[in-house]
Image: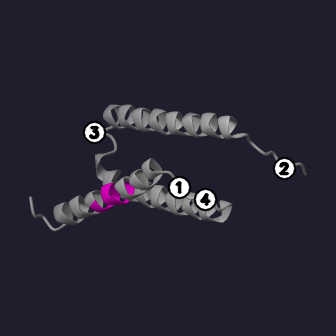
Amino acid sequence: MSERVLSDVQNAWLRRAEFLALIAVLVLGIGMGALAASALSTVAVPILLVGCFTVAWAMVQKQRVEVLSGGPPALWERALYWACWAAIGIVAAIVIWKSLGLT
């Protein structure tokens, strides 16, 4: 099995493409959610929780790979990492708040 080694320029392009794909998935998810809002309202919280868990797992796995690579993450990567955790915390707080009937 051959191992690909990317140049700095290729790695930068790869990261940009990954970021663009992430934005595309976000926009697609928002659009799909808007179209299916009434049909999925009864399962919205479980779907949201699965999504939060999946994002958290992906972030942890990505962080592990980056630590193993030896290079320190860029400032924007650390900021995005912690912003994602903050967003997950806010979503969890809203779900708990609403499930307790505290509107």
Spot occupied by residue 90 in the image (x, y as percentages of width and height): 26, 58
Residue 43 badge: none
Q: Please, what is the three-letter code of the amino acid marked with disc 3?
A: Ser
Examine the rendered structure and indicate whether residue 67 appears above or below residue 5.
below
First-in-chain label (1 vs 4): 4
First-in-chain label (1 vs 2): 2
Name the residue tied to disc 2: 3
Distance Cα–Cα, label 3 vs label 2: 47 Å
Examine the rendered structure and indicate whether residue 47 appears above or below residue 99.
above
Name the residue tied to disc 1: 73
Mark 4 crowd level (few <14, some 14–19, many ≥20, 10 Å Cα): few
Tell whether position 86 is magenta. Answer: yes
Residue at 28% from the left image edge and 39% from the top image edge: 38
Kindly state the secondary structure of the residue where label 4 is placed: helix
Name the residue tied to disc 4: 66
Distance Cα–Cα, label 1 vs label 3: 41 Å
Kindly state the secondary structure of the residue where label 2 is placed: loop
The range drawn in magenta is 84-89
Q: Nearer the viewer, mark 1 or mark 2?
A: 1
| Tally of marks | 4
Name the residue tied to disc 3: 38
The answer to whether marks 1 and 4 mark residues whose Cβ atoms lie closer than 8 Å is yes
